[in-house]
Image (spheres, rainbow, N blue to C red):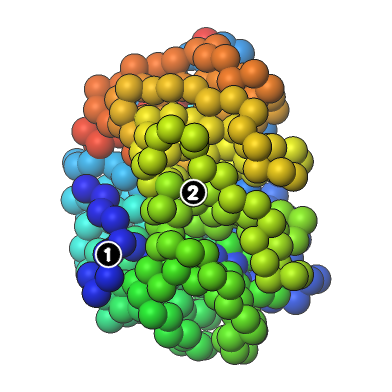
Amino acid sequence: MRTACRPGVATLALACSAALSLAAQAPARADAWPMFRATPALLGVADTRLPQPLALRWSYEARDSIESSAAIAGGTVFVGSMDGHLHAVDLATGKARWTYQTTGPIEESSPCVHDGLVFVGDLDGVVHAVDASTGKARWTFRTGGEIKSSPNCLGDRVYIGSYDQHLYALGAGTGALLWKVETEGPVHATPAVDGGTIYVAGCDEQLHAVDARSGMRRFTVSLGAYAGASAAIRDGRAYVGTLASEVVAIDLSTRRTAWTYRHPTRSFPFYASAAVTADRVIVGGRDKLVHALDRSTGRVVWTLATRARVDSSPLVAGGRVFVGSNDGVLYELDLTTGEKTWEFVAGAPLSASPAAAEGALVIGSQDGVLYRFGSS
């Protein structure tokens, strides 16, 4: 169950962006989805070519609800479940390769696959590093609060937030604490990476810019409201939805709001993270709508109504948008028009976000089923 930020209550926060030098910021390997939103900048755009139409290839039964979004790398799907297990599933067959038991339930923390390791956080506040081939523990690191943030892995570091109000930088190979930065609220969401700076927003209504190497704070920008979504970074702007029913674009050079979008009649929080393309910002809302905005101006291009709130973060592949809804439907929409072109009805709400790589799309549901789609 997802909750909203409230003053004085440890609920939501937003972490974003961590990095090393520009030279270290090579994009993720083509045709992989190794972490939440696919890339360090959290853009939610897949490089893979998906078949059309999609067909269900297999389903995998976890032991409990899947609200963690999957990662796909090297022919394996990695996903967490609420019974406290990290699952490695063969992408081609749907058979389990291994399962790893975490200290506590894995809720929204999504795995990050990097340099042969899989990183994930659990609700007991523990970060786990697991061998991607064998499922054996490499190291663990305990924070002071539950973890719903997904790790962002870059170079020799892992960045992750905790409800103890800190953003952490850990050594990827050892789990050693490199630095931690305190915010004024729980760090709920996933760090996004841009040019050696980390951007963290959340229950203190601020977007914080933090130096990724040293952990020194560079500046803060007011969001005007709590944020539960992760920020996406593109071309010097941060795009993030807030619990005040707004999507905000922040110009990171001027440190000012470039535009603010609010639906003219519906007033519901934006909890999902946005997918950002060259000219569109696609985001789901708790108003049951998927919104497509012009990236330059923030003006609405189209909306698509579902039958329940949309906490699933959209994925863009080519000219297609894929997004789950708590109505239990996985939607495929035309990126240009918003027209629904395909759907799949699952047996339970889809609050996890889809992932796509190697010609496949996967998404988990709250009844513990992981679905894999591809060619018929």
Q: Position of residue 47 (x, y in %)?
A: 69, 37
Give the vertical position of 42 relative to 276 (above or below).
below
- Residue at horizontal 64%, vertical 61%? 257
- The kind of residue on which mark 1 rests is Arg
Residue nearest the viewer, comparing 303 with 187? 303
Quickly name the residue at label 2.
246
Q: Earlier in the sequence, mark 1 or mark 2?
A: 1
Give the vertical position of 136 relative to 285 (above or below).
below
Could you tell me which secondary element the residue under label 1 belongs to? loop
- Residue at horizontal 24%, vertical 74%? 8
Q: Position of residue 297 (x, y in %)?
A: 71, 43
Quickly name the residue at label 1.
6
Could you tell me which secondary element the residue under label 2 belongs to? loop
Report which quarter residue 130 is drawn in. bottom left
Q: Where is residue 231 in the image (x, y as percent from the top left)?
A: 55, 57
Any part of residue 330 in sight: yes
Report which quarter residue 236 is drawn in. bottom right
